[in-house]
Amino acid sequence: MRTELAEEPEAHRSLAAHARRDQIIQAAAEVVAEVGYASTSTARIAERAGISKGVITYHFESKDEILRSVSLRFLDRCSQEVAARIESATTAHEQVHGWIRTELMFFAAHRVESTAMFDIMANHRDPGFSRAFDGEVTAETQRLAKILRRGQQLAEFRPLDAETVAHIILRCRDGLLDSWGQDAEGDLSSRIDTLLDFIDHAISVRS
């Protein structure tokens, strides 16, 4: 019994710390979406969160760590929804459609976070000055290429270079998101069918 009582305060502290980190990450996303990556500072993040800079440095070692957390948290949440949709699909065609539609609908429902994520991914560098998220981009391309190869094996998709086409599809997605991001009144959901129709013409077996 004494052990349980001793552990309870630590558990509460852990929950409070997790909540505070989430608060800081959300504030950072809002700041990046509003003023852009280059103008985002720890001071602005603290002001948006309504806390002191000291609280931020207690939970994060640097602004870079905060901004990386903004993108990774968003990507993780989106990936979980996409993975669930892909797992429920029975054909490769349904998997491709499910991937693109689920992902874009998730972005549409979280405009602030998605705007921040893309700005961070485009500008963030690792200590060697390489793009910090290149690994995530490559892994995503490989996952989609795997689905395209499965579609070829099932005779759903025509002969094609799966990795190259996966890269093209994802860059088309990025282009759509970029145009949507520049149009404050734009409706992303209305453009999804157009992109999927384009993809179908590119990969489906021609009759």
Image (spheres, rainbow, N blue to C red):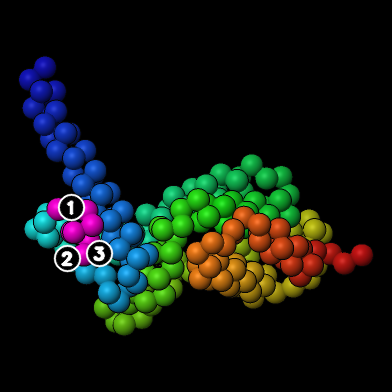
- The amino acid sitting under disc 3 is Glu
Residue 120 shows in this picture: yes
**Mark 2 sits on what residue?**
43
Q: Is residue 47 magenta?
A: yes
On the image, the x and y values in percent for residue 160 come to 74, 73
**What's the magenta region?**
43-51
> Residues under labels 3 and 2: Cα distance?
15 Å
- Which quadrant does the C terminus fall into? bottom right
For this orientation, the residue located farthest to the front is 185
Query: Sequence-wise, which precedes: disc 1 or disc 2?
Result: 2
Residue in view at x 50 percent, y 51 percent? 109
**Mark 3 sits on what residue?**
65
**Relative horizontal placement of residue 39, taking residue 115 as reference (left or right):** left
**Relative horizontal placement of residue 57, taking residue 149 as reference (left or right):** left
- The amino acid sitting under disc 1 is Gly
For discs 3 and 2, the disc positioned in front in the rendered view: 2
User: For numbered disc 3, what is the local secondary structure?
Assistant: helix
Q: Is residue 181 above or below residue 150?
A: below
**Mark 1 sits on what residue?**
50
CB contact under 8 Å: marks 1 and 3: no
- The amino acid sitting under disc 2 is Ala
Residue in view at x 64 percent, y 42 percent? 88
On the image, the x and y values in percent for residue 42 come to 19, 66
Residue in view at x 43 percent, y 64 percent? 115
* Nearer the observer, 181 or 20: 181
On the image, the x and y values in percent for residue 164 come to 64, 75
Query: Sequence-wise, which precedes: disc 1 or disc 3?
Result: 1
Query: Sequence-wise, which precedes: disc 3 or disc 2?
Result: 2
